[in-house]
């Protein structure tokens, strides 16, 4: 299996399966001399871990990261940073009923056909548990980025959409509720929506908005490595993501150029920011903002028709512990992948300017 590494200069390779002994990764290219705040890294894992509230999966994993290399006396050495997170709360028997059955809208069928076998215990390598390794790398990247600030939050759950401009939100309130929405009224509505959906044995999708502030001018490497293209790739690599848009996004397709153009101020900033902080694939110094759409979790506690490995139509029903909505736990994953992308481009920009 290829495709386990992301990045050009700041590179993350992840390993492990949902029900294996451990998951982990190797970060290559991280500059030396960065004093790491280990509590901050663990805090990001706490934000992603299962069992943190009543609206997420009740799998209980401490998700404690153990660094194996690349750090000495609390600082990065410039050598590969190896780490692992031991799995401690697997219930593999919960998946025995799908050993020979393909779950609808999962990777079961495609993995089996591509590789000739699959780890049916929670999806193995296709499980979203792999994203914990991304959160570790992203937390380190955020400490490397220093002044660049990344804020991701839940902006929609199902058909409930918070359309408040991000400039009017208090980002310090993102973690003040289980659903990670900075607007208390919408947070309450989102939470209730998830609870009702869970009670019905169903799941619901949602949207995460990300805002990046204090980005310097000049990040991005056209033609094929535009900054927004890499952000899109990073977001679409996250489990359950179905869509990505930045700036005006699809709404921009309904506008005239006279309304859509961002007119310059004398200092190079723009009066509006429908470009989303990016022009020609390069950051222009304005806020970068984008949205990421997540589908409903595919495992539902309702009976469905599907097929087995023999091609027979069979009936199945989800079992075990699953998220009724992935969005609350995906917020730190969006933060992490954003930080990894930016760290990579900051290093690439430095190499160009040297």
Image (spheres, rainbow, N blue to C red):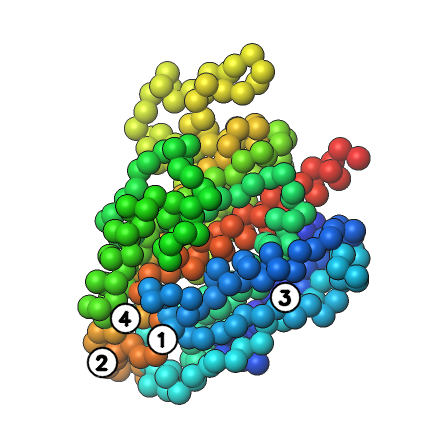
Describe the element under mark 2 as helix, strand or loop.
strand
Q: In the picture shown, does residue 177 fall above or below 286? A: below
Describe the element under mark 1 as helix, strand or loop.
loop
Marks 2/4: CA distance? 13 Å
Residue 206 x %, y %: 33, 52
Identify the image quadrant of residue 97.
Answer: bottom left
Residue designated by label 3: 25
Q: Earlier in the sequence, mark 2 or mark 4?
A: 4
Residue 4 in view:
no
Q: In the picture shown, does residue 60 fall above or below 206? A: below
Q: Earlier in the sequence, mark 3 or mark 2?
A: 3
Marks 3/2: CA distance? 37 Å
Marks 4/3: CA distance? 30 Å
Circle 1 residues within 10 Å: few <14, some 14–19, many ≥20: some
191 sits left or right of 345 in the view = left
Q: In the picture shown, does residue 322 fall above or below 260? A: below
Circle 2 residues within 10 Å: few <14, some 14–19, many ≥20: few
Q: Residue at x 62, y 60 (%)?
A: 39
Marks 4/1: CA distance? 10 Å
Residue designated by label 1: 321
Residue designated by label 2: 315
Mark 1 or 3: in front is 1
Q: Earlier in the sequence, mark 1 or mark 3?
A: 3
Q: Earlier in the sequence, mark 2 or mark 1?
A: 2
Q: Earlier in the sequence, mark 4 or mark 1?
A: 4
Describe the element under mark 3 as helix, strand or loop.
strand
On residue 284, the disc is none
Q: Earlier in the sequence, mark 4 or mark 3?
A: 3
Circle 3 residues within 10 Å: few <14, some 14–19, many ≥20: many
Describe the element under mark 4 as helix, strand or loop.
loop
- Disc 2 to disc 1: CB gap under 8 Å: no
Mark 3 or 2: in front is 3
């Amino acid at each position: 299996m290829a495709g386990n590494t992301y990045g050009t200069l700041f590179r993350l390779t992840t390993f492990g399966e949902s029900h294996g002994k451990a998951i982990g990764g190797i970060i290559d290219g991280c500059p030396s001399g960065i004093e790491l705040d280990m509590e901050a890294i663990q805090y990001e894992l706490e934000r992603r871990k299962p069992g943190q509230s009543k609206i997420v999966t009740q799998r209980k994993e401490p998700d404690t990261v153990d660094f194996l290399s690349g750090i000495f006396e609390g600082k990065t050495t410039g050598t590969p940073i190896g780490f692992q997170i031991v799995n401690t709360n697997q219930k593999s028997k919960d998946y025995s009923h799908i050993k020979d059955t393909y779950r609808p809208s999962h990777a079961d069928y495609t993995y089996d056909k591509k590789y000739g076998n699959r780890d049916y215990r929670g999806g193995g390598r296709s499980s979203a548990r792999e994203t914990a390794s991304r959160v570790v790398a992203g937390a380190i990247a955020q400490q490397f980025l220093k002044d660049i600030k990344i804020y991701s939050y839940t902006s929609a759950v199902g058909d409930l959409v918070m359309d408040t401009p991000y400039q009017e939100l208090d980002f310090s309130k993102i973690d003040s509720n289980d659903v990670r929405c900075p607007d208390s009224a919408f947070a309450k509505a989102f939470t209730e929506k998830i609870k009702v959906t869970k009670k019905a044995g169903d799941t619901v999708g949602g949207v995460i908005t990300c805002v990046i502030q204090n980005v310097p001018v000049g990040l991005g490497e056209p033609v094929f490595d535009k900054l927004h293209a890499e952000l899109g790739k990073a977001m679409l690599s996250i489990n359950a993501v179905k869509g990505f848009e930045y700036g005006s996004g699809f709404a921009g397709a309904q506008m005239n150029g006279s309304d859509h153009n961002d007119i310059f101020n004398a200092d190079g900033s723009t009066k509006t920011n429908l470009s989303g902080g990016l022009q020609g694939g390069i950051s222009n110094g304005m806020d970068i903002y984008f949205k990421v759409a997540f589908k409903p979790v595919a495992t539902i506690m309702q009976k469905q028709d599907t097929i087995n490995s023999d091609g027979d139509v069979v009936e199945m029903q989800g079992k075990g512990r699953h998220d009724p909505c992935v969005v609350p736990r995906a917020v730190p994953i969006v933060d992490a992948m954003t930080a990894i992308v930016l760290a990579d481009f900051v290093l690439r920009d430095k190499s160009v300017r040297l």
